């Protein structure tokens, strides 16, 4: 995809974000736009960075590591948004600006351990499986409060909020129910004023549903195909 198309896509998405924010009585500046770069080549990503989009999300550890030096040197900030295995934690500490996919106590403990060994504090989001889908990772809504309380005691981590991937729904009204439930949980936990928990980020909404997510309170949307076009997978 050429530079102009990527820049135009970003411009169009930002306009939709602004309209959705206004409809929800919010400011456009309250919502961060992340470019999801799974399977996207470095040169294509740099076009988005040149268009002013410096918040990136990678699903795979190996892709993050491969692209890191070039993108970091270009001024981009990279979050890990995909599932993280414990044996790969040390590889992302100090490289991922945030790990959005903390989906279990053991992985939180391992991130804390490796961060402490590196003399760092790692920003994380708690991943919530808002619809309780067996095919997805994350804490159930019922588990989340207890998990946050336990993870907050790990001093080489800093909980910055929550992330979710809702189920594929047949209608906007259905998906908004899940986003609304996530927002209620986010507000509830934020209101507890737990030490070491800064509920500033509610990461929800992707290319097909980010407008609905913003209407229900998202503060960060993760957009891939609407910026870069359909994903290209190796055959």
Image (tube, grey):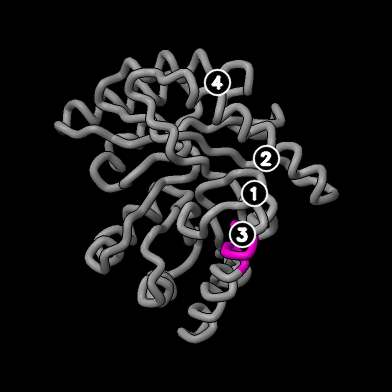
Q: Earlier in the sequence, mark 3 or mark 1?
A: 3
Left or right: 156 in relation to 12 = left
- The secondary element bearing badge 4 is classed as helix
Residue 179, disc: 2
Q: Do the residues labelled 2 and 1 touch (CB within 8 Å)?
A: yes
**Mark 4 or 2: the one toward you:** 2
Q: Which residue is found at the position 49% from the left and 23% from the top?
A: 191
What residue did someone put label 1 on?
A: 213
Q: Quote the CA–CA distance across marks 3 and 4.
A: 30 Å
Quadrant where the C terminus sits is bottom right
Vertical order, 27 against 48 (above or below): above
Q: Which residue lies furthest to the left in this view?
A: 119
- The answer to if 20 sits in the magenta stretch is yes
Q: Which residue is drawn at 67% across and 57% down?
A: 23
Bounds of the magenta segment = 16-21
Calculate the distance from the C-alpha at mark 4 to the C-alpha at mark 2: 16 Å
**Residue 138 included in the magenta stretch of the image:** no
Q: Name the residue under label 3.
A: 22
Task: Look at the image and tell me whether residue 102 can be seen.
Answer: yes
Q: Which tag is nearer the camera, tag 3 or tag 4?
A: 3
Q: How many residues crowd mark 1 within 10 Å: few (<14), some (14–19), many (20+)? A: many
Left/right placement of residue 192 relative to residue 137 reads left
Q: What element carries label 2?
A: helix
Answer with mark 4 or mark 2, whichever residue precedes in sequence.
Answer: 4
Residue that badge 4 annotates = 144
């Amino acid at each position: 995809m050429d530079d102009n198309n990527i820049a135009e896509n970003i411009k169009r998405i930002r306009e939709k974000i602004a309209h959705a924010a206004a409809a929800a009585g919010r400011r456009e500046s309250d919502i961060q736009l992340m470019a999801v770069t799974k399977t996207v080549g470095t040169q294509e990503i740099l076009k988005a960075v040149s268009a002013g989009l410096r918040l990136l999300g990678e699903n795979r550890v190996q892709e993050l590591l491969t692209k890191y030096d070039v993108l970091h040197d270009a001024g981009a900030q990279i979050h890990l948004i995909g599932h993280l295995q414990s044996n790969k934690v040390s590889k992302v500490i100090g490289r991922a600006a945030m790990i959005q996919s903390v989906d279990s106590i053991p992985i939180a403990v391992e991130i804390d351990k490796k961060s402490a060994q590196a003399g760092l504090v790692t920003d994380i989001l708690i991943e919530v499986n808002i619809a309780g889908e067996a095919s997805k990772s994350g804490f159930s809504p019922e588990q989340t409060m207890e998990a946050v309380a336990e993870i907050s005691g790990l001093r080489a981590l800093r909980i910055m909020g929550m992330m979710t991937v809702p189920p594929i729904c047949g209608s906007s009204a259905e998906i908004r129910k899940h986003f609304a439930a996530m927002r209620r949980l986010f507000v509830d936990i934020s209101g507890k004023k737990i030490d070491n928990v800064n509920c500033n980020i509610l990461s929800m909404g992707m290319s097909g549903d980010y407008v609905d997510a913003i209407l229900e309170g998202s503060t960060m949307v993760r957009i891939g195909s609407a910026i870069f076009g359909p994903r290209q997978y190796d055959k």
